[in-house]
Image (tube, rainbow, N blue to C red):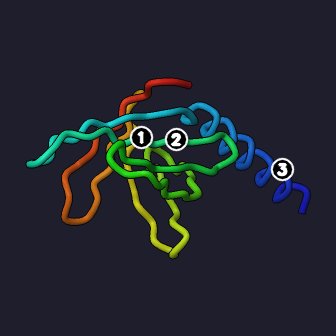
């Protein structure tokens, strides 16, 4: 039992450290047919996050988690959007839409 508690504690510490490393503000520029816009992704160290588009007024909120080089965005409706962490960038492909390359703009 003691070993299980130690392993769980280590797992949580590594997860928190990775969250703190990834947390920050990211932006991706999209060139649509009609207009260009900026997509902002904000990841807070507590696992909360938001997604906003410069041409719209509302934010989409989600919870996020990191597993290896993958980032998981958990939506309120139960969906999960998966991305890949690549240095100071996060690459996310939405189904039926282009790949977004989010660059870290502020930690």
Mark 3 or 2: in front is 2
Q: Which of marks 3 and 2 is nearer the N terminus?
A: 3
Helix, strand or loop for disc 1? strand
Q: Is residue 73 left or right of residue 20?
A: left
Can you identify the residue that label 3 sits on? 6
Question: Residue 99, percent across and down?
Answer: 23, 48
Helix, strand or loop for disc 3? helix
- Other-residue count near label 3 (Cα within 10 Å), few / some / many at <14 / 14–19 / ≥20: few
Question: Residue 83, percent across and down?
Answer: 38, 51
Helix, strand or loop for disc 2? strand
- Other-residue count near label 1 (Cα within 10 Å), few / some / many at <14 / 14–19 / ≥20: many
Foreground: 59 or 74? 59
Q: In this view, does 103 lie to the left or right of 4?
A: left
Q: Quadrant of residue 54?
A: top left
Q: Earlier in the sequence, mark 1 or mark 3?
A: 3
**Label 1 with label 3: CB-CB less than 8 Å:** no
Q: Measuring 59% from the left and 57% from the top, which residue is drawn there? A: 63
Q: Distance between the residues labelled 1 and 3?
A: 38 Å
Location of residue 70 with respect to 88 vertically, above or below: below
- Other-residue count near label 2 (Cα within 10 Å), few / some / many at <14 / 14–19 / ≥20: some
Can you identify the residue that label 1 sits on? 40
Classify the position of the C terminus by image quarter.
top right
**Label 1 with label 2: CB-CB less than 8 Å:** yes
Question: Residue 73, percent across and down?
Answer: 49, 57
In the rendered image, the residue lying farthest to the right is: 2
Can you identify the residue that label 2 sits on? 42
Question: Residue 106, percent across and down?
Answer: 51, 24
Foreground: 29 or 57? 57
């Amino acid at each position: 039992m003691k070993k299980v508690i130690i392993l769980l504690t280590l797992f949580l510490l590594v997860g928190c450290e990775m969250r703190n490393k990834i947390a920050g503000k990211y932006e991706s520029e999209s060139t649509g047919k009609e207009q260009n816009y900026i997509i902002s992704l904000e990841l807070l160290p507590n696992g909360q996050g938001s997604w906003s588009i410069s041409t719209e007024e509302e934010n989409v909120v989600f919870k996020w988690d990191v597993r290896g080089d993958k980032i998981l965005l958990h939506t309120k409706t139960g969906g999960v959007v998966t991305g890949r962490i690549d240095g100071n960038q996060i690459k996310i492909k939405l189904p039926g839409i282009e790949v977004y390359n989010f660059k870290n703009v502020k930690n």
